[in-house]
Image: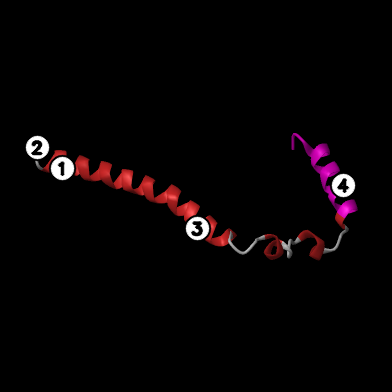
Amino acid sequence: MIFQRKYERAIRFLRERRGNSPAALTDETLGDQIEKGDVPALILSALLVIVPVCLVLLGGASLLAYFFLVR
């Protein structure tokens, strides 16, 4: 590996900081960090990104089909 020493140094630092227990490597407090309105905001922002892209792709495919079938 190219960065083997840096990788080992980072892992050693994390183990010293968090300990060797497997429970220290999992993030169980993630639910405490998300606030009440975060989930609906995440869903809304995902829809605002995904839906226009899908509409553009669907419109492009329908225009392509129109030009091949009608013309």
| Residue for point 21% across, 40% down | 64
Tell me the amino acid under the disc marked 3. Ile
Q: Are marks 3 and 1 in contact (CB under 8 Å)?
A: no
Cα separation, mark 3 vs mark 2, equals 41 Å
Question: In this figure, which residue is indicated by the disc labeled 1?
Answer: 66
The disc, 3 or 2, on the residue closer to the chain's N-terminal end is 3
Q: In the figure, is residue 53 to the left or right of 32?
A: left
Question: In this figure, which residue is indicated by the disc labeled 2?
Answer: 71
| Residue for point 32% across, 44% down | 57
* Callout 2 secondary element: loop
- Region in magenta: 1-17
Tell me the amino acid under the disc marked 4. Phe
Tell me the amino acid under the disc marked 2. Arg
Q: Report x, y in % for residue 63.
A: 21, 41
Cα separation, mark 4 vs mark 1, equals 61 Å
Cα separation, mark 2 vs mark 4, equals 67 Å
Q: Report x, y in % for residue 14.
A: 84, 50
Q: In the figure, is residue 69 to the left or right of 8?
A: left
Q: Are marks 1 and 2 in contact (CB under 8 Å)?
A: yes
- Which sits in the foreground, 7 or 23? 23
Cα separation, mark 3 vs mark 4, equals 36 Å
Q: In the figure, is residue 46 to the left or right of 9?
A: left
Q: Quadrant of the C terminus?
A: top left
Count of number-bearing discs: 4
Question: In this figure, which residue is indicated by the disc labeled 3?
Answer: 43
The disc, 1 or 2, on the residue closer to the chain's N-terminal end is 1
Q: Are marks 3 and 4 in contact (CB under 8 Å)?
A: no
* Callout 1 secondary element: helix
In the picture as drawn, the residue positioned furthest to the left comes out as 71
The disc, 2 or 4, on the residue closer to the chain's N-terminal end is 4
Question: In this figure, which residue is indicated by the disc labeled 4?
Answer: 13
Residue 4 against residue 42 in the figure, above or below: above
